[in-house]
């Protein structure tokens, strides 16, 4: 076997081994976690907790497996989203024995589409996906929707994304910004009850003990399940709790 073939095989084996060891793989395989296919997966958090970075962890995971990712974002430039991917990839590369040079390869497996206003996202996203899949020949395995604020108009939007996920047979990971009440508590009740009409894959992110913890809600419960995972604030990498 030629040296170049050996090198390519070694790189592939390193990536596969890293994928097996990374916490995100454990998250995807956990009985109370994961991103079920053909389904809307929601992540609630207040501003500044790290919803975008959390979503990027999954985008990178799929890209490292040479699977295409569509990343739709509201309120951020394409350059900023690419910065998120690059920064988190570099930390992921250090933690999982990947080469930073692999960034060029990884970058080819995600497409970023940004909108200034959320209304443009809801009007155009379905058409964009259809065009990319049917006309451009893309075969995305994950769709990320980031930067959306929860509001009283969210019901029709969640219904739209639920239908897209089912019709395209692709998991959608959507982040939703929630806020605090006057007493400082998270205003989760209304968003949660609305979300439960469309999915049982509902996550909440928040700071606890200097970590960003992740909890999951069932479709019929107001009490979250504490997952054995957290996000490390200084790297924004998903980690498994000891």
Image (cartoon, rainbow, N blue to C red):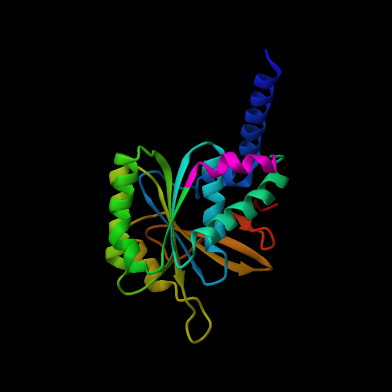
Q: Is residue 192 above or below residue 136?
A: below
Q: For this rendering, which residue is in front, 164 or 72?
A: 72
- x and y, in percent, of residue 239 in the image: 65, 52
Q: Is residue 162 above or below residue 48?
A: above
**Can residue 223 be seen at all in this image of the molecule?**
yes
The verdict on residue 106 being magenta is yes
In magenta, the rendered stretch is 99-110
**Residue at the bottom extreme of this rendering:** 182
Q: Is residue 125 above or below residue 191?
A: above
Quarter the N terminus occupies: top right
Question: Left of 100 or right of it: where is 72?
Answer: left
Q: Residue at x 33, y 65 (%)?
A: 120
**Residue at the top extreme of this rendering:** 1
Question: Left of 20 or right of it: where is 174?
Answer: left
**Can residue 227 be seen at all in this image of the molecule?**
no
Magenta segment's dominant SS is helix
Q: For this rendering, which residue is in front, 217 or 159?
A: 159
The verdict on residue 133 being magenta is no
- x and y, in percent, of residue 203 in the image: 48, 59
Q: Choose top left, top right, bottom left or bottom right for residue 226.
A: bottom right
Q: Residue at x 58, y 39 (%)?
A: 105
- x and y, in percent, of residue 56 in the image: 54, 53
- x and y, in percent, of residue 166 in the image: 30, 46
Number of marks drawn: 0
Q: Residue at x 54, y 37 (%)?
A: 65
């Amino acid at each position: 076997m030629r040296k170049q073939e050996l090198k390519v095989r070694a790189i592939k084996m390193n990536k596969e081994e890293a994928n097996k060891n990374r916490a995100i793989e454990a998250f995807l395989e956990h009985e109370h976690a994961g991103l079920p296919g053909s389904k809307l997966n929601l992540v609630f958090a207040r501003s500044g907790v790290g919803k975008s970075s959390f979503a990027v962890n999954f985008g990178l995971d799929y890209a490292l497996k040479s699977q295409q990712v569509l990343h739709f974002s509201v309120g951020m430039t394409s350059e900023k989203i690419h910065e998120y991917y690059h920064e988190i990839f570099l930390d992921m590369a250090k933690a999982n024995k990947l080469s930073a040079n692999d960034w060029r390869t990884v970058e080819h497996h995600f497409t970023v589409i940004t909108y200034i206003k959320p209304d443009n996202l809801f009007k155009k996203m379905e058409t964009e996906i259809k065009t990319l899949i049917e006309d451009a020949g893309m075969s995305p395995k994950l769709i990320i929707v980031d930067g959306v604020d929860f509001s009283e108009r969210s019901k029709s939007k969640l219904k739209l994304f639920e239908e897209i996920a089912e019709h395209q047979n692709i998991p959608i990971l959507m982040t939703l910004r929630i806020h605090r009440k006057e007493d400082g508590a998270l205003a989760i009740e209304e968003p949660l009850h609305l979300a439960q009409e469309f999915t049982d894959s509902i996550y909440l992110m928040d700071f606890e003990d200097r970590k960003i913890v992740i909890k999951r809600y069932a479709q019929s419960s107001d009490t979250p399940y504490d997952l054995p995972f957290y996000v490390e604030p200084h790297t924004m990498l998903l980690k498994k709790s000891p």
